[in-house]
Image (cartoon, helix red, strand yellow):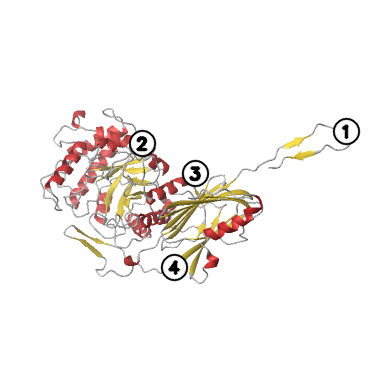
């Protein structure tokens, strides 16, 4: 797929302000919440509308002495800014319950298929699945990098070894009996049930103590047969089940996943890429899934130079970022632009950019309020729409949902909100987004009858602002050093308010729904509006809150005509039935 202009990160044109107003007329008002209040009718509706506006605006008129910042969010409902990018990928399979338990996976294991379907997940990366999807065991005779009780290490080794595909590297790659496809088949089948693409990570799980494959020709032959099994039906396999094949994971990250040299990785990539293409010429192959993306390394520039010199296929370049020690969602845009320029400079203008691991600072994920992480995720996904990123996969989603499909975490709700955009795939021109965490995305369906708007108000924590005492080099014991981006200093208003202006609407009646995600859960407000062409509404928006808005044009209600039988003496009378 050609990059062309789709990789250029131009901001969408902003919308001008012109005659924005809301026509009241006869309105119906409805809201849903904890109390389940009834819908006001008749002459009480205007008073209820006023009460609702005071509610959603947070009593702005009563708190005028407090300084506020107003963000003007303008959406052109008639515009077409191109197709939304479907950045709905995840790490973590929808269902690994067949494993029973695993010391490497979130506990308890649950079937989250319904949640993945609700979020319309469109890409699942197979990495870190408890040994499922691994080619061979990660257990070798090298010393462990990190201290770990022997009993726990033995349990992890046994769990991985039970699930890997090719347990004995000395076995015959041409013999189907050498392969243990069962667990990985179930993993892939679960992904196919949610109609998502598979990004198959070729290699091993983390903390490996095994050296690089000694016989690359044999290892490449194993890879070729794995591709044949999942794409060409070899050994009672599947047809076209895997689209993307990724060679290893983070070979640059301090020997956690790779104990070899850069040159040994180059040789492995060459053998693996050729094996994938020989088994399935239509398959997409890439790598190197690096973690040290913000610095010149042998696994970045050196890898690209090797691939170019040997004319190897590189359909996608994969990389990871967690905004370590900054928790700044705009960093994904900055890194993506830098990598796009690097790929172009090396001649890989058609190579796609895959951010297939990302999240909040992984050291703080379990100590940060979940709603704070969720608003970070929402703002990041909105920013990525204007970044040269072709696929993304958050790490990880297999604890986001309940068995019923409802979100178990605020981040699960954010993924569902983004999944709802599948029925409004045309992006709208809008303004109001900044680079500091306040992010807006608007889209419509082809008919223009439904509009969805996502508004996220993330704030960089004060502790993550300003210069770092240790500079830009982040050292992790004896494992690795990473160059991280400079931290920013941002002043946020005590209270943020945004004015939502949607114009160029077809006149008519509209249903307005706003679902607000906070740390306490979700709350929904609904209104029926009679619109002459524009809507203007105001809301307060606390920090770490995400609004999901839907505006849908209602069908025109044609009142049936009731005619009396024909009579003499004048024109017939026509009675109109009123509701």
Image check: 51 left or right of 8? right
Image check: 137 left or right of 450? left
Q: Quadrant of the N terminus?
A: top left
Read off the residue under disc 1: 568
Disc 4 on helix, strand or loop? loop
Cα separation between marks 2 and 3: 21 Å
Q: Quadrant of residue 243?
A: top left
The numbered mark, 3 or 1, whose residue comes first in the sequence reads 3
Of residues 231 and 562, the one drawn nearer to the viewer in this rendering: 562
Of residues 75 and 202, the one drawn nearer to the viewer in this rendering: 75
Read off the residue under disc 4: 494
Disc 3 on helix, strand or loop? helix
The numbered mark, 4 or 2, whose residue comes first in the sequence reads 2
Disc 1 on helix, strand or loop? loop
Read off the residue under disc 2: 192
Read off the residue under disc 3: 423
Q: Residue furthest bottom?
A: 65
Q: Quadrant of residue 215?
A: top left
The numbered mark, 1 or 2, whose residue comes first in the sequence reads 2
Identify the residue shown where x is 18% and y is 31%.
178
């Amino acid at each position: 797929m050609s990059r062309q202009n789709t990789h250029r990160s131009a901001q969408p044109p902003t919308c001008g302000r012109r005659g924005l107003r809301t026509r009241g007329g006869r309105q119906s008002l409805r809201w849903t919440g904890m109390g389940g209040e009834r819908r006001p009718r008749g002459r009480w509706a205007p008073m209820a509308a006023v009460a609702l506006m005071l509610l959603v605006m947070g009593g702005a008129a009563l708190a005028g002495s407090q300084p506020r910042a107003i963000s003007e969010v303008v959406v052109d409902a008639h515009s077409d800014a191109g197709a939304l990018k479907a950045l709905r990928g995840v790490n973590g399979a929808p269902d690994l319950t067949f494993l029973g338990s695993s010391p490497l996976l979130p506990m308890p294991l649950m079937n989250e298929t319904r949640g993945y379907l609700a979020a319309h997940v469109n890409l699942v990366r197979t990495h870190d699945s408890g040994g499922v999807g691994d080619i061979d065991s990660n257990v070798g005779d090298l010393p462990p990098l990190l201290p770990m009780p022997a009993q726990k290490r033995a349990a992890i080794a046994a769990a991985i070894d039970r699930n890997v595909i090719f347990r004995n590297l000395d076995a015959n790659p041409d013999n189907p009996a050498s392969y243990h496809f069962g667990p990985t088949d179930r993993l892939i089948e679960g992904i196919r049930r949610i109609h998502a693409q598979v990004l198959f990570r070729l290699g091993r799980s983390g903390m490996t103590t095994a050296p690089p494959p000694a016989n690359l020709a044999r290892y490449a032959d194993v890879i070729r047969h794995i591709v044949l099994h999942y794409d060409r039906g070899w050994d009672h396999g599947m047809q076209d089940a895997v689209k993307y094949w990724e060679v290893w994971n983070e070979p640059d990250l301090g020997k956690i996943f790779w104990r070899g040299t850069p040159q040994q990785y180059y040789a492995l990539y060459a053998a693996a890429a050729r094996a994938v293409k020989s088994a399935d010429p239509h398959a997409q192959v890439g790598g190197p899934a690096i973690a040290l993306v913000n610095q010149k390394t042998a696994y970045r520039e050196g890898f690209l130079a090797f691939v170019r010199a040997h004319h190897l296929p590189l359909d996608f370049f994969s990389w990871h970022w967690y905004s370590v020690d900054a928790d700044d969602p705009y960093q994904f845009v900055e890194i993506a632009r830098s990598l796009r320029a690097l790929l172009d400079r090396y001649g890989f203008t058609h190579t796609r950019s895959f951010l297939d691991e990302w999240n909040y600072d992984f050291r703080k994920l379990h100590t940060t309020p979940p709603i704070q992480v969720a608003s970070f995720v929402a703002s990041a996904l909105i920013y990525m729409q204007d970044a040269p990123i072709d696929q993304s996969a958050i790490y990880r989603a297999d604890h986001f949902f309940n068995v019923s499909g409802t979100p178990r975490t605020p981040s699960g709700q954010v993924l569902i909100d983004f999944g709802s955009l599948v029925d409004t795939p045309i992006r709208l021109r809008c303004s109001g987004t900044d680079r500091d965490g306040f992010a807006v995305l608007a889209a419509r369906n082809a008919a223009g009858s439904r509009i969805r708007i996502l508004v996220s108000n993330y704030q960089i924590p004060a502790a993550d602002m300003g210069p770092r005492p240790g500079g830009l080099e982040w050292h992790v014991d004896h494992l690795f050093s990473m160059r991280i981006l400079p931290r920013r200093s941002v002043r946020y208003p005590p209270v943020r308010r945004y004015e939502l202006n949607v114009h160029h609407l077809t006149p008519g009646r509209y249903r307005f729904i706003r679902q607000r995600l906070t740390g306490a859960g979700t709350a929904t407000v609904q209104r029926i509006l009679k619109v002459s062409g524009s809507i203007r509404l105001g809301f307060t928006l606390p920090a770490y809150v995400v609004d999901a808005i839907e505006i849908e044009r209602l069908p025109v209600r044609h009142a049936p005509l009731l005619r009396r039988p024909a009579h003499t003496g004048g024109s017939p009378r026509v009675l109109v039935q009123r509701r």
